[in-house]
Structures are given as structure tokens and as C-alpha cells.
Image (cartoon, helix red, strand yellow):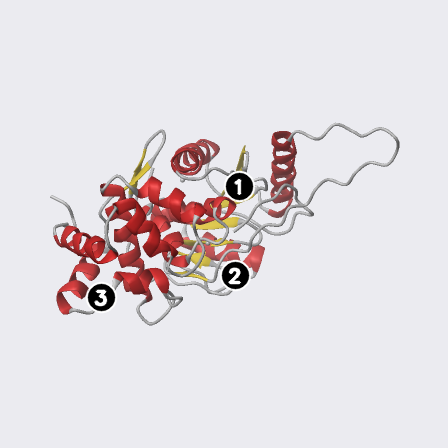
Amino acid sequence: MSHARAIALAGLALFAAAAVGLGPRRERFARAGLTGPEGDRGTTAARAAAPPARSGAATAPAADPNEVLAAACRRQAEALRRRLDRGFSLVVRPPFVVAGNLPQDRLESLSAGSVVRPAEAMWKAYFRRRPTEVITVLLLADERSYRRWADRLFADKDVPYFGYYKGDPRTLVMNIATGTGTLVHELTHALIVWDFPDVPTWFNEGLASLHEQCQVGRDDVVGLVNWRLPGLQQAIRAGRLRPLRDLLTRDDFRGAQQGLNYAQARYFVMFMQQQGVLKKFYAHFRENHDGPEAGVKAAEAIFGRGFDGVEKDFLAWVGGLKFPPD
């Protein structure tokens, strides 16, 4: 259930796709080029495209990056207007262009509460670097229009039920009738790549999954217990849960136990949040990501003890959680 830095847009192709609840529980998956809460083929890192130098003796002043991005958002919005029908409304909030077949006031509310607000909170809590290219958010009112427009705009026919993120072209496509939990999940993928382009899958999906069910504050996003807990607790009791070290060091997140990997990653990230060390862990991990053992080393450094002790405390904490909570 996520890589980039840049400035420019080169042409406006196909695009699109706010707090926070969780729609009906259904199986989620992904196809090539798509990321969703139950699958991710990886996001494509954006490449910087510097404005061409002007000829002549004088050098023109550098363009204001904020205005460059705002202008790109306006062009993106106009391109979307030409591709979408009259039932769509648009909201431009750089770096986001939000479109949806919803009333304008409803789209404004979703844009503010479930796109801009959680994005600002994540930038304050974790991410130092903000997007320098447009992120398009397409909010479809129901499953029928969601599938129709995913096909029409991107030729995506077999799509996850809740929604997905396309790393190229930086677009969230959402069935907003299912709630906004998946929107914030996928928004996390769209933002983290600018700050931590090489983020390992376990943490990318762990943090995004944490945000499926959360409370958004002014400067943080606090994950809450959700439907992934019972399966994780059952696996622990049955002795089927892989060692936490394996989750953090092996490149097999998308393997046979993918669903369980999501749960284990989510609740380990939530454990760090509960212990008050998640922000410190992220910063340390980002700055010291130098191999498969980096996550283990970061955890040991932040917790100040061996990883076996960290895992023991994590499992004991998970065992005491309840869903639904009392």
C-alpha cells in the first residue's frame, strides 16, 4: 500500500486525482505504473529541468520558483478543463491541482481538509523538501465514474477499488465515495519522494498506511488503530509473523505475505510514533540510508538499544492494542 526533485513541466499529458476516514474494506492491488495501499511498483523520480539560459550579454533574473510552480499549476488546470466534461470543478492550490465531478464547494472542502491540510502537516513533521512540479489530484464521485475516467484519461482498466497514485505523471486518482483515508495514504507517497527519493518500500508503505486512519493536526499527522490490526495479532499468535529485521532488510515486501507486510510495517511505524521517536527516526534514516541494514541501525540509534529489544517491546505493544478501540 513511492522519488524526486525538480522544477518544470514539459507538456501537459494525462492526469489527475482529501479529514480522514476509511472506506469499506476491500482487496487492494496495483498494476504497472500504479501505486495503491495494497501494491506499489514504485514511483518515478522527477528530473530537474532548469530553464534555458537566454542569449545575449545580459543575464535575466532567475525566475521565482513559487511563481514558476503556480504558473505550471494554472496551465495544468487549463489542460484538465479541456479534457474533462462540464460536470467537473477545479481547485488550484500549488503544488496541487484538484479536479472532481463534485460541486465546487465540496471540492474546495476536500482540497483544503484532505489534500492541503495533511500535506502541510507532513511538511512540518517530516519532509524538508517540497514538490517543485505539479501534483494532480482527481476525485471521482463514485466507483462508476472513477473507473470510467481512469480508463479514459490513462487507459487504466484494472484499477484498485479505493484509488491509486501514478508516479508518472504525478497523479492521484481516487474513488472518493470510499472515504478519504486512501487519499491521504497516496498523498504520502506523492510527497515523500521529493524528500527521500530512495525511501525503502517498507517505510514508504508503513508511513502511508499509518495515514489511512489518522488525525491531522497543524504540524503532525497522528495514525490511529485500524483494520490491519487483527490480522497482525493473529499472525503473531500463530507464529507466522516474519522477524522485524527481515521486514526492514529484505527486498521482498511485495512477496507472498504482502498484506501482512503492510500491517507489520504500519504498526512498527505507529509504535515509533507512540514512543515519540518517529520524526527523529525518519530524519536519521533519511540522512544515513546507506544499505539494507540502515533501518535497523537507525532504530538502534534512536531507541538506544539493540534491535532484538526494540522488536520485543514492539510485539508486546501490538499485543495490547484493540480494534475497534474501546
Question: Are discs 3 and 1 less than 8 Å apart at CB?
Answer: no
Residue at mark 2:
33
Query: Residue lying farthest bottom?
Result: 256
Q: Dot 2 surroundings within 10 Å: few (below 14), some, or many (20 or more)?
A: some
Observer able to see residue 141:
no
Question: Given the image, on which type of amino acid does mark 2 rest?
Answer: Gly
Residue at x-position 70% and y-position 42%: 50
Observer able to see residue 203:
yes
User: Viewer-nearest of labels 1 and 2?
Assistant: 2
Residue at mark 1:
88
Looking at the image, which is closer to me, 242 or 298? 298
Question: Are discs 3 and 2 less than 8 Å apart at CB?
Answer: no
Question: Given the image, on which type of amino acid does mark 3 rest?
Answer: Leu
Question: Given the image, on which type of amino acid does mark 1 rest?
Answer: Phe
Q: Quadrant of the N terminus?
A: bottom left
Residue at x-position 47% and y-position 57%: 147
Looking at the image, which is closer to me, 171 or 65? 65
Residue at x-position 34% and y-position 40%: 279
Residue at mark 3:
241
Q: Quadrant of the C terminus?
A: top left
Q: CA distance from mark 3 to mark 1?
A: 46 Å
Residue at disc 3, secondary structure = loop
Is 270 positioned to the left or the right of 157 in the image? left
Residue 126 percent coordinates (x, y): 40, 39
Is 282 positioned to the left or the right of 277 in the image? right
Mark 1 or mark 2: name the one nearer the start of the chain.
2
Is 36 positioned to the left or the right of 43 in the image? left
Residue 225 percent coordinates (x, y): 22, 47
